[in-house]
Amino acid sequence: MDELERMLGAVIGGVRTWEEEWEPFVRHPSLDVAGVRLQEILAEYAARLRDNYPFFHPRYAGQMLKPPHPVALAAYAGAMLVNPNNHALDGGPATAAMEKECVAAIAAMFGLPKQTLGHLTTSGTIANLEALWIARELRPAERIVVGANAHYTHERMAGLLRLELETLPMDRVGRVDLDALEASLRRGGVGTVILTAGTTGLGAVDPIAEAVQLACRHGARVHVDAAYGGFYRILADSDSAGLASEIRSDLRAISDADSVVVDPHKHGCQPYGCGCVLFRDPAVGAIYRHDSPYTYFTSDELHLGEISLECSRAGASAGALWATLQAFPLTPDGLGRILGSCRNAARNWFALLQDSDALQAFVEPALDVVTFFPRGSRSPAALDAASQDLFERAMRDASDPIFLSVLRVGARLLPSGLNRDEVGDPVRILRSVLMKPEHEAWVPRLHARLEALAKGQS
Ligand SMILES: *Cc1c(COP(=O)(O)O)cnc(C)c1O
């Protein structure tokens, strides 16, 4: 039995023991699978699942994708036998309590006050939607400002909420431009400033420490979208973890935000369906208030369904996160060790790129997203084509495949020395998300292989 099977056995066995304490009953024949060709169905199912990129493997260094930790998987599967619904306390008291513990642990990681209100969501998108909705309810007549580097969800959700949104330019390394932010705040009418800790494209961290002070001076609220990079806060207290001191102070400044979003289904080792939103001021709970004739109460205690826009939510999701955080607490020696290796992978790759005559780094990675392109192109259009060509050749090579992603960047951000006659269209470069700790050991190999491919060798 492998590790996962042992864990699954322990959790499922435990839940089964509880079930057996109840009076036995006969399962209805309509639920029988005896007449079904189950082996064949499941074999076909497993075969169809092969139609995927190998997200589990260090060769896959493309998008923000990886399987959950086996602890999360076993805990999730075990909870599914019960199938609790964290919509209300009565839908699953055990996982509702676990959700509160997880939220408290995440709030503590960010250095937010003890009374911080929050809950898990189905995704970072929904978590951000809730934060923007609260932003609108608190400051209905004022606009929100967001960097051009932010996730596209903010613009879309602002449209959904009919919130006025102003987009600010970003600097050369993909962070929101502070001068533009200050100018916007000076003009007045800014309700909430959205900052990103770990942008989806470059993994950049906005200058949160300075931006928070600017926002505070002009009476604006701050929302930090830390969906991707939030868990790096664990490594921000020590200078031995490989984060630049500026990044560390920006991550620490998340403690001053009015609301924060982080995605446990990205760097928290969870299966999809696990985002989290936090609010510094628990009074925002009143905005969520609803009067439901369906919601059954056996307790006066606050349940998280009362402060969530979503109704049914998987209790299994809270259970999986809870179990994972027991095994890998939000400390430098817990989840921080995993993140530390991801960060090392990115730093090491950047160093290799600095010395490479075939590949050139686009920006220095702030966290664990590495961006680069083949050297030697004379024009943005040629660089675009060379990146796409390398992307495809790396992926299609049957004996030694490497899976990257491409990112479109503004041509004006590319290094000088390039003929910029064709400036206008965004240019594709290569992007690699190193979110598996095994990438630390694999980076030299990935780099050497891509260098060889870029030089036209196979
Ligand atoms: C991934 C991401 C989102 C969207 O979250 P989902 O969980 O994919 O819905 C929002 N913002 C940032 C910065 C992200 O990286």
Image (spheres, rainbow, N blue to C red):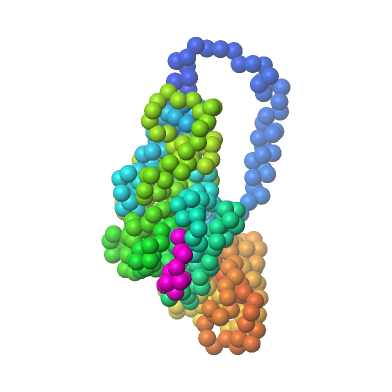
Magenta-span inclusion, residue 183? yes
Quadrant position of residue 254: bottom left
Where does the image place residue 431, in percent across and percent down from the top left? 54, 67
Q: Which quarter of the rendering shows the C terminus?
A: bottom right
Where does the image place residue 425, in percent across and percent down from the top left? 65, 76
Give the camera-side residue of 88 and 76.
88
Relative to residue 183, is residue 32 drawn left or right?
right
Magenta-span inclusion, residue 330? no
Residue at the image point whose x is 58% and y is 68% from the top: 407
> Seen from this angle, which residue lies furthest front?
141
Where does the image place residue 232, in percent across and percent down from the top left? 38, 57
Quadrant position of residue 95: top left
Residue at the image point whose x is 37% and y is 44% from the top: 282
Relative to residue 182, is residue 125 drawn left or right?
right
Residue at the image point whose x is 44% and y is 48% from the top: 277
Quadrant position of residue 25: top right
From the viewer's perspective, is residue 119 above or below residue 173?
A: above
For the record, the magenta segment spans 182-191
